[in-house]
Image (spheres, helix red, strand yellow):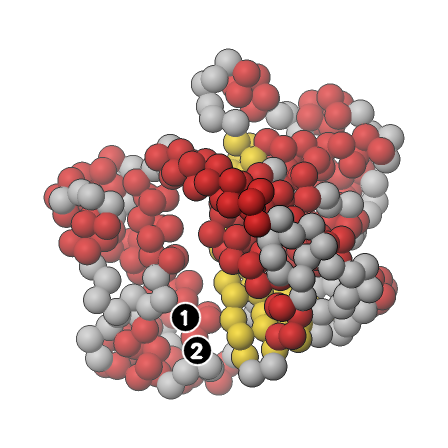
């Protein structure tokens, strides 16, 4: 189950309180009962993505605010990210902060995956949300990243461009453009922030090496505990997500990385109503969106772990009922 930290969820309720909405009435309206479960220790202190979606969607409709996630993201504080927020705050520079985000993001929410790339004089951070994330969740996440960096570096700092996978009205697009101070692309392939690569070396005013190291140890411990509570399916998915490519990725190697035998891993996954082949195929299909149009088909086949391009073509035809070339032309 996709979840987020209680403090990140609660910060949304705190903002709604400032707008005159009573927290208890809001929770009652979305039929939320997870706090009871947390207090009785039936569940770990994490909130489901379903409840988070419901909260932000309820706020959007109740307040008649189509950009509620954007407004919420503007109000973010480093404390709302928990220990990760303080880890970022004590980082030496932006590049160090991004490294912390990539490593420990799941402590705040494991509802998507952050990726970082350098391309000539441009750097970009991309967020691949879980398919069930609502548009408001995506808006909050993208806005919060820029808001926090402005707080730590310079209130006038602006990205080079923002890409959002969702549609927006012209009015809403102008509102975002005015705040981000950069072009906004909508209906984009990815949700991502591009910025000059020179920003990476900008020093944080709150840089504190000793505190940063201490917080890193705390974060490592929390991450280890969080992973130990994950289902085997979630652990396999995280392993697949973390790999640069899927070449030479198979059941045996994945089981070994989890300190299990292949048979034991199969048994655990069967108990969770899935199989390694199904998870592996899902990850292959997710990466196709990233690769197609960017690399030749022969390279994509290798990156996705196929023995040759013919095998890739056959699998693609089975998934999308067309050839990779026809699919690319349609896109």
Residue 237 horizontal/vertical position (percent)? 35, 50
**In-front residue for pair 51/216:** 216
**In-front residue for pair 295/272:** 295
Q: Residue at x 78, y 45 (%)?
A: 75
315 lies left or right of 162: left
Q: Residue at x 77, y 72 (%)?
A: 182
**In-front residue for pair 286/44:** 44
Q: Secondary structure at mark 2?
A: loop
Residue 174 horizontal/vertical position (percent)? 84, 67
Q: Residue at x 67, y 39 (%)?
A: 80
The quarter of the displayed image where residue 304 is located: bottom left
Q: Is residue 220 visible?
A: yes
Quarter holding the N terminus is: top left
Residue that badge 1 annotates: 288
Labels in figure, total: 2
The CA distance from mark 2 to mark 1 is 6 Å
Q: Secondary structure at mark 1?
A: helix
On screen, residue 322 above or below 95: below
On screen, residue 153 above or below 34: below
On screen, residue 198 above or below 224: below
Residue extending furthest toward the front: 210
Residue 184 horizontal/vertical position (percent)? 73, 70
* CB-based contact (under 8 Å), mark 2 and mark 1: yes
Q: Is residue 50 visible?
A: no
Residue 285 horizontal/vertical position (percent)? 38, 64
Residue 292, numbered label: 2
């Amino acid at each position: 189950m996709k979840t987020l930290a209680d403090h990140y969820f609660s910060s949304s309720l705190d903002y709604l309180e400032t707008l005159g909405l009573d927290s208890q009435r809001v929770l009652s309206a979305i039929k939320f009962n997870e706090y009871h479960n947390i207090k009785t220790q039936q569940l770990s202190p994490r909130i489901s993505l379903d409840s988070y979606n419901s909260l932000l969607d309820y706020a959007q409709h109740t307040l008649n605010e189509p950009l509620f996630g954007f407004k919420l993201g503007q109000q973010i504080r480093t404390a709302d990210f928990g220990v990760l927020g303080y880890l970022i705050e004590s980082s030496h520079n932006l590049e160090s902060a991004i490294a912390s985000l990539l490593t420990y993001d799941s402590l705040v929410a494991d509802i998507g995956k952050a990726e970082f790339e350098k391309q000539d004089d441009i750097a970009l951070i991309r967020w691949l949300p879980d398919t069930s994330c609502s548009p408001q969740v995506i808006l909050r996440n993208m806005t919060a990243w820029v808001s926090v960096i402005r707080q730590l570096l310079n209130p006038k700092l602006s990205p080079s461009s923002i890409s959002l996978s969702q549609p927006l009205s012209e009015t809403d697009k102008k509102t975002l453009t005015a705040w981000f101070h950069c072009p906004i692309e909508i209906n984009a392939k990815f949700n991502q922030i591009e910025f000059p690569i020179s920003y990476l070396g900008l020093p944080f005013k709150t840089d504190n090496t000793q505190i940063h190291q201490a917080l890193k140890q705390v974060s490592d411990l929390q991450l280890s505990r969080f992973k130990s509570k994950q289902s085997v399916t979630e652990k396999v998915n995280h392993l697949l997500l973390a790999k640069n490519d899927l070449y030479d990725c198979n059941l045996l190697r994945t089981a070994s990385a989890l300190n299990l035998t292949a048979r034991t891993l199969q048994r655990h996954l069967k108990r969770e109503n899935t199989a390694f082949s199904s998870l592996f195929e899902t990850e292959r299909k997710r990466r196709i969106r990233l690769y197609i149009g960017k690399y030749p088909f022969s390279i994509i086949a290798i990156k996705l772990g196929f023995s040759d391009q013919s095998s890739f073509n056959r699998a693609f035809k089975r998934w999308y009922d067309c050839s990779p070339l026809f699919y690319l032309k349609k896109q």
